[in-house]
Image (cartoon, helix red, strand yellow):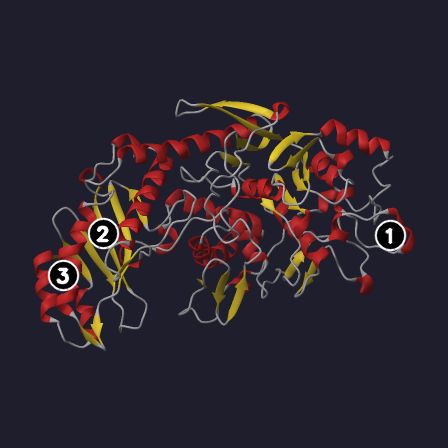
């Protein structure tokens, strides 16, 4: 371990030297109040930036001890610091870079508060002239500027105590409501006053002047929160809930908020008190996805060519088969709530009317309208469904919410009256393959996967995330663009790092894929993200904890996945 003065002198001595000389800086340098760890030095100016860390005792910060006793509180504190550090660095020298957090409060490797130590992972681009080191400039940045970053951020005197308290309380309130959902037989909650609309299609920040949400009186529930506030809002009950309304009136916006409600959001997001069943999974059509050994026979059977739908595999699924596979895999990983929007669904998967049945008698698809009640009654799985073009689901719904210019109304009684008026019995509007010998118990049958199919041949190049929607595995790419509940590129990176852990778990425990995935996520939750990043010099700041659902969905889309025979 050297001192900051020694680092300063060393950098000056390297001024004008070949870039490779920087490798000698790797190690720990002691500053006043914190340590700087130079973990990985880039080999040349055009390579990925060098990885550095700052560590300091929590007692050296102004973070109140009361916010460090509980795991969830420490996540909130770490997330708060990560945002402050990013803001500070984004306004400072461009050589320093920090990972930008999204709107969600999540465990991140960029900042951790564990075992009495705060650790901040950054990258640093050592300045160069061609391939020669600008040692004097680097010394000014690391030895003169970096201490100011620490002192005048949330790590030091710039800590905003009120904002930190609000951040912690927001997470506490969210988790309290989420725990209460199951006890109250709810699968979702949308607080009165919530702002659901986003600024634009490619922005996750709230829309200015959006209509605040206000629950219908019939569906209003109340919570007394740990923060001391009493709130009200829409309580979505277990069972079948329809969200209906005209185009652009807010039904898909509400479903999208519930889709993202599996994660807590920061104060000011507008959705910080939109809370969903933590196992909720969005199910959609996904033309072209790979499917391996998924049992879709409950939904699709008797395909031409005697294709096996009890272990259905394809490299290029259709809209209906992909949606059936997505539903089956959601059940396989243990969802208690399915979220579906007609706009992203295959029509023939959802409904089939009498006229089409009369014209085309040979139909292998049992449409979802004929399975939705069984899904609830036989398996206890709730559905929240957006429908604007068909009333076929009215008779099955326990609750029907209509949105008109973003204002919700309970229209359940009227929907049931219309269903009765038009004589919509269970099979009159939608009759497909209604063979009840195809038991719903088969939906979500566990798959046992060959662990070797998850391993890359070249171990020197492990799987890695490439942005939010793609993982590179060897020379192949895993496409995740339709996983709409994947919200942070750090989660994609974590999923890539999880793949070898899942493969090892499959090898050692000899268990199906779903429990192997669950055990890996539980291990990370228990031991921290160091399970993926390693400790000390291997730490990286670009990893965010994913859910087991997205990890499982990603693996299920891997084109080289094989079942174990």
Front one among 320 and 454: 320
Element at label 2: strand
Front one among 371 and 173: 173
User: Disc 1 designates what residue?
Assistant: 356
User: Disc 3 designates what residue?
Assistant: 140
Residue shown at the point (65%, 60%) measured from the top left: 291
Q: Determine the CA span between mark 3 and mark 1.
A: 75 Å
Q: In this view, does 439 lie to the left or right of 215?
A: right
Q: In this view, does 528 lie to the left or right of 414?
A: left
Q: Is residue 17 left or right of residue 395?
A: left
Residue shown at the point (20%, 42%) measured from the top left: 156
Q: Would residue 144 be visible to someone looking at this image?
A: yes
Q: Compared to 297, does 214 lie above or below? A: above
User: Disc 2 designates what residue?
Assistant: 54
Along the polypeptide, which appears first: circle 3 or circle 1?
A: 3
Q: Quadrant of the N terminus?
A: bottom left
């Amino acid at each position: 371990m050297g001192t900051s003065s020694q680092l300063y002198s060393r950098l000056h001595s390297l001024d004008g030297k070949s870039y490779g000389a920087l490798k000698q800086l790797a190690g720990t340098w002691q500053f006043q109040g914190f340590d700087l760890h130079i973990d990985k030095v880039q080999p040349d100016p055009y390579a990925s930036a060098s990885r550095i860390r700052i560590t300091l005792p929590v007692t050296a910060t102004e973070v109140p001890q009361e916010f460090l006793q509980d795991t969830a509180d420490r996540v909130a504190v770490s997330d708060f610091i990560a945002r402050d550090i990013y803001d500070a660095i984004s306004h400072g020298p461009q050589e320093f870079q920090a990972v930008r957090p999204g709107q969600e409060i999540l465990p991140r490797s960029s900042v951790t508060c564990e075992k009495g130590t705060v650790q901040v992972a950054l990258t640093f681009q050592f300045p160069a002239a061609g391939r020669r080191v600008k040692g004097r400039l680097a010394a000014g940045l690391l030895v003169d500027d970096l201490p100011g970053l620490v002192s005048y951020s949330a790590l030091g005197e710039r800590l905003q105590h009120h904002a930190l308290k609000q951040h912690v309380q927001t997470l506490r309130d969210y988790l309290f409501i989420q725990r209460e959902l199951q006890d109250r037989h709810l699968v979702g909650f949308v607080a009165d006053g919530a702002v659901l609309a986003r600024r634009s299609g490619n922005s996750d920040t709230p829309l200015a002047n959006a209509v605040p949400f206000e629950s219908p009186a019939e569906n209003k529930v109340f919570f007394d929160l740990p923060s001391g506030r009493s709130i009200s809002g829409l309580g979505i009950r277990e069972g079948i809930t329809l969200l209906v309304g005209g185009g652009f009136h807010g039904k898909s916006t509400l479903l999208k908020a519930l889709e993202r409600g599996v994660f807590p959001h920061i104060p000011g997001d507008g959705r910080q008190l939109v809370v969903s069943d933590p196992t909720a999974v969005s199910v959609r059509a996904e033309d072209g996805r790979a499917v391996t050994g998924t049992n879709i026979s409950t939904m699709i059977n008797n395909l031409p060519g005697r294709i096996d739908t009890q272990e259905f595999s394809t490299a290029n699924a259709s809209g209906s088969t992909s949606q059936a596979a997505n539903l089956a895999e959601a059940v396989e990983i243990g969802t208690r709530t399915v979220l579906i929007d007609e706009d992203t669904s295959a029509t023939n998967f959802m409904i089939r009317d009498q006229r089409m049945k009369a014209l085309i008698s040979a139909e292998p698809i049992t449409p979802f309208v004929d399975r939705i009640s069984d899904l609830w009654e036989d398996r206890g799985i709730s559905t929240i469904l957006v429908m604007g073009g068909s009333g076929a689901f009215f008779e099955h719904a326990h609750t029907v919410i209509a949105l008109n210019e973003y204002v919700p109304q309970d229209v359940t009684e009227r929907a049931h009256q219309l269903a009765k008026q038009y004589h919509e019995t269970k099979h009159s509007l939608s009759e497909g393959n209604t063979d009840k010998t195809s038991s719903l118990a088969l939906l979500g049958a566990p798959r046992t996967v060959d662990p070797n199919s998850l391993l890359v041949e070249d171990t020197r190049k492990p799987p890695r995330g490439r942005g939010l929607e793609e993982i590179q595995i060897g020379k192949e790419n895993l496409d995740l663009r339709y996983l709409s509940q994947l919200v942070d590129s750090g989660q994609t990176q974590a999923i890539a790092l999880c793949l070898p852990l899942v493969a090892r778990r499959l090898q050692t425990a000899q268990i199906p894929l779903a429990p192997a995935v669950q055990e890996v996520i539980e291990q990370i939750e228990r031991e921290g993200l160091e399970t993926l990043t390693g400790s000390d010099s291997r730490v990286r700041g670009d990893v965010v904890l994913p859910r087991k659902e997205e990890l499982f969905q990603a693996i299920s889309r891997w084109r080289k996945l094989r079942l174990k025979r």
